[in-house]
Amino acid sequence: MRPSALRLPVLRLTALLVAFVGLAAPASASGDEEELDAVHHTSDGFYVDFAPFGHIELPRLFVVRRADGSLGFDVFGSSTAAVASGRYAIESHNEGGHGEGEHDDLEPGAENAEAGHGDLTVEELSEANAEEVLGESVEAEHAYDAVLLPVEGELLVDLSITRHLVFALIAVVLLLALFLPMAGRYKKGIGRTSAPRGVLQNMLETVVVYVRDEIAKPNLGDKHEKYLPYLLTLFFFILTCNLLGLVPFGATATANITTTAVLAIITFVVTQFAGTKDYWGHIFNPPGVPGFVKPILVPIEIMGLFTKPFALAVRLFANMTAGHLVILNLIGLIFIIGGMSATAGWLTSIPAVLLTLFVYCLELLVAFIQAYVFTVLSALFIGMATAEHAHDHDHSEDHGLDAHDLALHQSTPLVNGGAHKKEHERTVGTEAVLA
């Protein structure tokens, strides 16, 4: 390759590195700067963050019980508007004035007017209410970052739209935009009676075939077609959410424990409804176990039903959160050292940015791996529940296998060395495991 052909990629990489260093370089110390809080930036919030350019507040929806005992539904365009209305106040946790968890009973109109806030704008009134509640100077834009409570009555449910919910919905819209046109193509026969057309259809079909042949079939056997739509939905949704978190100003919905918990609960429900008589018999009447041991073993088996979805939820949540924390802390290291010495901060920025780029690439790989792991474990749990042993009792006796063990052995050939799988049915993943 000619040197001139290499010059352009090198210049682009150099420009990218300089841009990262320029953005990450420590600024001059001033009293108006905010400290970088990595946990805060990875957590959920009632706004979409475009720092340092600003933010967009999201609507706030509250189900409340009024002072007279009636139920109400309050809708505000933003947290700032909710505080400015005088009907909601920022929760106070400081020791002076109010007890922990209590909030100030601010009247919507009279007290604010008496305090000299009668002619204030929405932003100024929000700041004034926050100052009265917290007893300290709080900037108006911080209202969206606080817990809001009704001035009168009781908050029952906060249905407010959050940042992670927004990006989860964006993932849903993107998937619909991708797969609905693809479904239309397959209905016309493109990809069924003829070869797939276009880069997008070929890429999506490659992934779909991989999930079918390497995840669904090995774990679910003949029943894979029944659960393949769920597994595909699971894989593509998690993957899209993971990748959206790597986009500038994006947020990772799967870094929220509520999102991963919902996905794990759905897998749990599907698994239990798919359970066969052998599956439930192994839980409530473990075969081959002395009678006096069963009262101890049955509660353990029941606990095992819930530890599986718990592990699914925590694994995905922890892995997606950890990577973002590492990236933010590497960037934060520049500002910490830069606060001690500007020169040291500039020198630190170069290795910190290089490490950040490395971790960012690693996070891209993790996004695919975590989507695969969650999907393959879901398929494994469903396969264990749907496996049957209606035949080959003598085979189980010869090998010392009880009913459930044989069913599990048949349902998970990748784990069990490809047992009960004909040579021509072996997939690439099976060959890799057996090698």
Image (tube, helix red, strand yellow):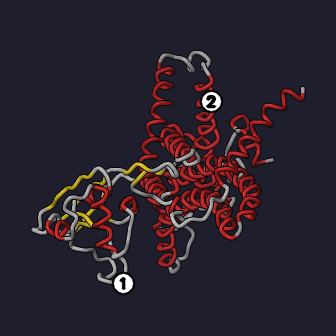
Q: CA distance from mark 2 to mark 1?
A: 58 Å
Amino acid type for the residue under numbered disc 2: Met
What is the quadrant of residue 424 in the picture?
top right
User: Does residue 274 sit above or below 66 in this rendering?
Assistant: above
Q: Position of residue 52 (x, y in %)?
A: 52, 52
What is the quadrant of residue 347 in the picture?
bottom right
Residue at the image point whose x is 27% and y is 61% from the top: 125
Residue at the image point whose x is 23% and y is 66% from the top: 150
Q: How many marks?
A: 2
**141 horizontally vs 75: left or right:** right
Disc 1: which residue: 95
- Of the pair 420 and 264, the residue shown nearer to us: 264
Amino acid type for the residue under numbered disc 1: Glu
- Of the pair 405 and 265, the residue shown nearer to us: 265
Q: Is residue 113 visible?
A: yes
For mark 1, give the secondary structure.
Answer: loop
Disc 2: which residue: 203
Which residue, as the protein is rendered here, is positioned at the far left?
A: 68
Q: Position of residue 413 (x, y in %)?
A: 66, 48
**194 horizontally vs 82: left or right:** right
For mark 2, give the secondary structure.
Answer: helix
Residue at the image point whose x is 54% and y is 59% from the top: 317
